[in-house]
Amino acid sequence: MLYLIGLGLGDAKDITVKGLEVVRRCSRVYLEAYTSVLTVGKESLEDFYGRKLILADREEVEQEADNILKDADISDVAFLVVGDPFGATTHSDLILRAAKLGIPYRVIHNASIMNAVGCCGLQLYKFGETVSIVFWTDTWRPESFFDKVKKNRQNGMHTLCLLDIKVKEQSLENLIKGRKIYEPPRYMHVNQAAQQLLEIVQNQRLRGEEPEETLCVGLARVGAEDQKIVAGTLQQMCTVDLGEPLHSLVITGGSLHPLEMEMLSLFSIPENTSESQSIDGL
Amino acid sequence: MLYLIGLGLGDAKDITVKGLEVVRRCSRVYLEAYTSVLTVGKESLEDFYGRKLILADREEVEQEADNILKDADISDVAFLVVGDPFGATTHSDLILRAAKLGIPYRVIHNASIMNAVGCCGLQLYKFGETVSIVFWTDTWRPESFFDKVKKNRQNGMHTLCLLDIKVKEQSLENLIKGRKIYEPPRYMHVNQAAQQLLEIVQNQRLRGEEPEETLCVGLARVGAEDQKIVAGTLQQMCTVDLGEPLHSLVITGGSLHPLEMEMLSLFSIPENTSESQSIDGL
């Protein structure tokens, strides 16, 4: 049996009791390590589970899925995913391969940012299409995702923006020379996402509203003890300090339910934050 | 501290390790019992947690929230919710009351149908606004939610339909006479949802497409060992047998990614199902 097991969002103890039981009895346990991260590392998970984990990076999962599935018809293999196994499409791919090989599979679900984002008080059913915001480079500055944000807002729906993660990426030079030397991991912060969004807004010269005043919610380390949520304008999101990754950003859909407003007020940025920040920065 | 703890979707062991630890040390533990249900009852949860649970129905949570919050500033109180605590809005209400009373709170997230629905292979980020389908009565047959389904489809997005649950409802007669006698719980099946949808489609005389041929996905007991997923037309959803509750229905957004199509093919209804069902039914 192939088990796809969600680890939730915070630390080692966010696995479900059922998930933990399966992990402890499987013959091999893989940890998917490229679409998201917990606030703790592989070693903490190994200590808590009492099991060695095999790190599965993107190459492994996409090119050597057969290794992962080896003998899964006669023994139990677990594939651990931060959040829920169905946040990213790649895991459908693993299931389809298993199905072709006649290997049965089971999913043990957990929280993902796709539903845990509700903790900011915005109503989950009012979220439209989710978008991803990628790191811009000097030569690649995609804006097309912003059409989806606009469409969601036109329909009164909130947009969850997943922020880019670069894990095990090669520099262009190393890629060309075929050197397997990897850059340190990078995680986009809410500040950078907001700055890119503001730049798009300025490029597109959006009129009739003041996009920099759009109400947004920044979220960091959702599910962890030190999670941080702030509600403020897109402009404010450029400077707010949310600390360590992972970050996510929500662009609200415009008209909010009174209950949503009241919840967001719990997380509003104090009036003098940007001022005190600039004082600190002197 | 007030803890809002998601229980996930299947049985007692779908709680997270962190959630279980908190449940075992809290001075009072409430179980919210009106927005969803697990495949096991209160007693199974009590056995597994080793704790007595206080059932909190809608009245309790809405009218007597202060009982739930009593002494939560000096002791730990847990409020358990099937799925994740932020699927339904009422729990924002509890948090706001806690905030006003100066009671700190923490959320322990879990899977909810809002993200676990990804197990059918449809990509989560392509879901639009979620709708609820309620039991029609002789005099109340709301259709307005269907505009949201149409809008989602126009935008190429899938629609998750949450199906009605009637727990602790009074008959009109008992309500008028003020008798606290409750009807047995009722859970809408995919069949009934599909039939109501077909009726709306016929009332609205939708042209240019064949709505009864719309590709849908029926899901039952997601996360449980005996979960069932079927993909087929809206017409087929009227007769397919998914067994016990809870059921959910997805109306696809039209154009599917090849990977979505391939995943759905794992769940397609065998050609002769409706025939063999009618044979079984003879």
Image (cartoon, coloured by chain):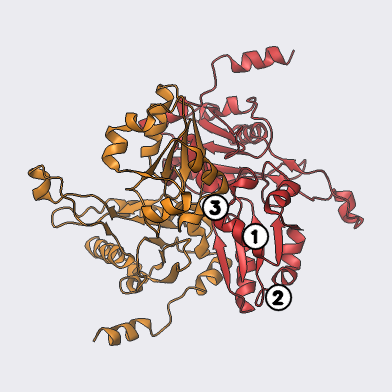
Chain colours: A orange, B red
Tell me which residue sits at (57%, 42%) in the image: B161
Tell me which residue sits at (61%, 56%) in the image: B20
Tell me which residue sits at (40%, 62%) in the image: A251
Instruction: Determine which quarter of the picture holds residue A235.
Output: bottom left
Q: Which of A11 and B175 lies nearest the eye of the viewer?
A: A11
Tell me which residue sits at (60%, 38%) in the image: B224
Image position, residue A4 (x, y; %): 46, 39
- From this view, report whether residue A100 is shown above or below residue B151: above
Q: Is residue B67 left or right of residue A82?
A: right
Q: Are marks 3 and 1 in contact (CB under 8 Å)?
A: no
- From this view, report whether residue B194 is shown above or below residue B106: above
- From this view, report whether residue B30 is shown above or below residue B218: below
Which three-letter amino acid code belongs to the residue tagged 2?
Answer: Asp
As drawn, the label of residue B71 is 2
Q: Is residue B196 visible?
A: yes
Q: Is residue B247 left or right of residue B116?
A: right
Alpha carbon distance from label 3 to label 1 = 14 Å
Disc 1 sits on a residue from what chain? Answer: B
| Viewport quadrant of the C terminus of chain A | bottom left
Image position, residue B190 (x, y; %): 63, 34
Judge if badges 3 and 1 mark residues of a common chain: yes
The residue mark sitting in front, 3 or 1, is 1
Image position, residue A125 (x, y; %): 53, 52
Q: Which of A2 and A230 lies nearest the eye of the viewer?
A: A2
Alpha carbon distance from label 3 to label 2 = 26 Å
Which residue lies under the disc numbered 3? B110
Q: Which of B278 and B81 lies nearest the eye of the viewer?
A: B81
The residue mark sitting in front, 2 or 1, is 1
